[in-house]
Image: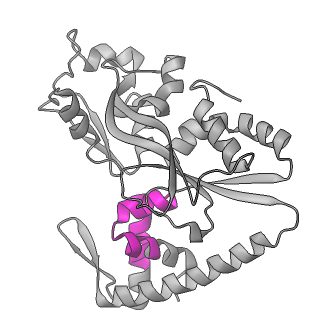
């Protein structure tokens, strides 16, 4: 029988029919998802996906296995929920947050909220998990922070946190190498791309009306935060978002020579219903809305 971890990767890839989105949801690389799916196929001796035109589609066998794995995981989720709810006199909530936002924006500021939570709700605890894209509150998730780049329907409540603003970022001392004195990208500038946001550069170019270098050398990474880390390492110019690179801009490690523009998307706190007064949900929302961009622990 394939490993449980490999089946978990297969289930996400089957449900989303996209290895990249499955990787983002499980906080893994695209390659890790691909290897896990391949290991299941090799173990069973049958193809589970049909791969064509850089997309994947479930085969009949894949759909059969996906249904069985989904049902099994749903039973495990319900068992975990029952056990969690049986914990006496303790409120435990799970907050799912997009991986890059969790790493670069929320976690550096989280200790301040933990102290605030301890003062007002001493028996409450919020567990942070990384996740992106679609999700279900039946998966043990109570609250989620997501960018509205997918349709989450009308069955949940959304509170806007901030608008997404994007722009090219690079190491401060390398600006002259990759930008002209007229603030244009030089030909041959290495542009850093990411599988999870493949259209980031084209979207920025369309919004700003600026042309991308015709002879740029593309560098592709599995995750958005890899491209930002590559920019910090001096490997090229990445599309950064203001909130995710704010601390690096403040420290002087990165600079945004052309500034930032809103790309039409926004980050929201998602829940089953509006926050009840004096609840942990309300405390979290208030803190997220009033958090200072450069606030640290």
Q: Is residue 222 above or below residue 48?
A: above
Drawn side of residue 296 relative to residue 66, left or right: right
Q: Residue at x 26, y 32 (%)?
A: 190
Which SS type dominates the magenta stretch? helix
Left or right of residue 289, residue 125 in this image:
right
Q: Position of residue 71 (x, y in %)?
A: 52, 86
Q: Quadrant of the C terminus?
A: top right
Residue found 55% across the figure and 74% down from its top: 5
Q: Which residue sits furthest front?
A: 277
Is residue 58 covered in magenta? no
Foreground pick, 251 / 273: 273
Q: Position of residue 192 (x, y in %)?
A: 31, 37
Give the magenta-colored segment's residue range.
11-39
Between 110 and 172, which is closer to the camera in this rendering?
110
Q: Is residue 211 left or right of residue 270?
A: left
Q: Nearer the viewer, residue 83 or 189?
A: 83
Q: Position of residue 272 (x, y in %)?
A: 57, 60
- The residue lying at 44 percent from left, 86 percent from top is 67
**Horizontal arrangement in the rendering, residue 115 relative to residue 27 (left or right):** right
């Amino acid at each position: 029988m394939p490993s449980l971890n490999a089946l978990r990767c297969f289930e996400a890839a089957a449900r989303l029919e996209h290895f990249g989105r499955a990787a983002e949801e499980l906080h893994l690389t695209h390659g890790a998802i691909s290897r896990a799916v391949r290991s299941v196929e090799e173990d069973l001796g049958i193809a589970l996906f049909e791969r064509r035109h850089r997309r994947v589609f479930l085969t009949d066998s894949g759909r059969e296995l996906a249904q069985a794995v989904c049902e099994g995981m749903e039973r495990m989720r319900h068992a975990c929920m029952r056990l969690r709810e049986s914990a006496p006199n303790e409120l435990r909530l799970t907050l799912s947050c997009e991986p890059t936002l969790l790493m670069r924006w929320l976690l550096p500021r989280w200790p301040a909220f933990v102290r605030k939570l301890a003062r007002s709700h001493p028996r409450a605890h919020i567990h942070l998990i990384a996740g992106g894209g679609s999700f279900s509150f039946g998966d043990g998730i109570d609250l989620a922070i997501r960018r509205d780049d997918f349709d989450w329907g009308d069955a949940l409540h959304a509170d806007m946190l901030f608008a997404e603003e994007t722009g090219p970022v690079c190491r401060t001392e390398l600006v002259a190498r990759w930008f002209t004195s007229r603030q244009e990208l030089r030909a041959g500038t290495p542009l850093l791309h990411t599988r999870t946001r493949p259209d980031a550069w084209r979207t920025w170019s369309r919004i700003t009306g600026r042309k991308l270098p015709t002879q740029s050398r593309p560098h592709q990474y599995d995750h958005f935060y890899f491209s930002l880390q590559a920019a910090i390492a001096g490997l090229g110019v990445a599309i950064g978002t203001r909130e995710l690179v704010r601390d690096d801009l403040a420290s002087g490690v990165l600079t945004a020579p052309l500034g930032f523009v809103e790309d039409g998307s926004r980050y929201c706190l998602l829940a089953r219903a509006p926050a009840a007064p004096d609840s942990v949900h309300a405390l979290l929302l208030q803190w997220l809305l009033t958090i200072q961009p450069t606030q640290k622990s």
